[in-house]
Image (spheres, rainbow, N blue to C red):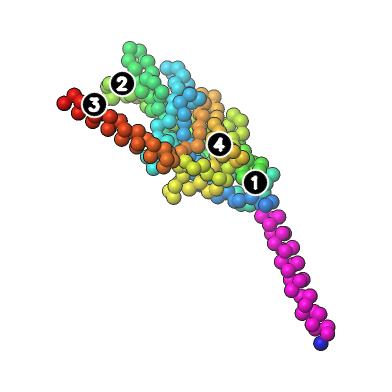
Amino acid sequence: MMNRKRIDTVSPRIAAVLFIALTGWLGANNVAMATPIGPGFDLFHTPAGPTTVTTPVGPISLQGRPIDPSLGDTDTIVERLAGIDPLPVGGQGTIPIQIIDLSLESISPVPIGSSFFDVFVDLAGPQTLGSMTVFHGVANGGTFDADLPVNARLTFTEVGNPSNTFADSFFDVFVTLTPGSWSHTPRPDDAHNATFPAGGFFPGVDPITGGKVLILEVAPSATHGVLPGQIPEPSTLLLLGSGLAGIAVFGRKRLARKV
């Protein structure tokens, strides 16, 4: 009886020690193994300035032309066709990628002869697969390199005479000039949705600060600089709405004074 009582008293202590040890082991392994990266879509915005394309009429500076209001200012969509699971901190993996949408326009009309033309850029025909190598540098993200083939079409439309139009096409492989940053955590203004999920991978976002980082891709005939696609935060939309309402009230007051 004495021995059984002793065993019954000690057993809960042993169980508690085993539970704590098991919890610590699981926690350590969860820290070591990162959050998986799933298949998904990378949504980008092309700001005015760093993007140019070389054409028979000379270099043309381009900017983004948003694809769809539901995606905010997104003008470039790249699909990641596979994921990486698991990818430990300090590790790396390579996945296939493919551009699936592109919508750019010239910053200003381009002179050709005695006329001026607006230039629009979209995809042309089948797109070749590229690759992205992801480096998991810190717990919340890291850097990546990518080779992205792009088969694009440039459409020239005369200003004031839309019936006068012609097209030119080019194929090139864009390569990241320096490693791009990525994070597991989306920004508050992130443009992903149910149709275009992120898969736990947000390129162009610093994994430490959460700030935007420009991704610059270069090719023999073009340069493409992109930021993460964004949708204005509700507070920004509210501020914009308040400003428009104020302008409307001011306009009504001016009209009342004139009457």
Task: Tell me the kind of residue under disc 2.
Answer: Val
Q: State how far apart marks 3 and 2 are (Cα).
A: 36 Å
Task: Tell me the SS state at disc 3.
Answer: helix
Q: Is residue 27 magenta?
A: yes
Q: Nearer the viewer, residue 101 or 242?
A: 242
Q: Which mark is residue 159?
A: 2
Report the amino acid beneath label 1: Ala
Q: Main SS of the magenta segment?
A: helix
> Could you say whether the residue bearing mark 2 is in a helix, strand or loop?
loop
| Circles 3 and 1: CB atoms closer than 8 Å | no
Disc 4 + disc 3, Cβ < 8 Å = no
> Would you say the residues marked 2 and 4 are in contact, meaning their CB atoms lie under 8 Å apart?
no
Locate residue 204, reporting x and y percent.
Answer: 55, 37
Residue 211 numbered tag = 4
- State the CA–CA distance, disc 2 to disc 4: 38 Å
Question: N-terminal of the two: label 3 or label 2?
Answer: 2
Question: Of label 4 and label 3, which has the lower sequence position?
Answer: 4
Which region shows up in magenta? 2-30
Find residue 254 and name its label.
3
Residue drawn where x is 39% and y is 21% of the image:
108
Q: CA gap, disc 2 to disc 1?
A: 51 Å
Label 4 sits on what residue type?
A: Gly
Whether residue 194 appears in magenta in the rendering, the answer is no
Tell me which numbered mark, 2 or 1, is placed earlier along the sequence. 1
Q: In the rendered view, tell whether residue 116 sits above or below residue 223.
A: above
Q: Quadrant of residue 252?
A: top left
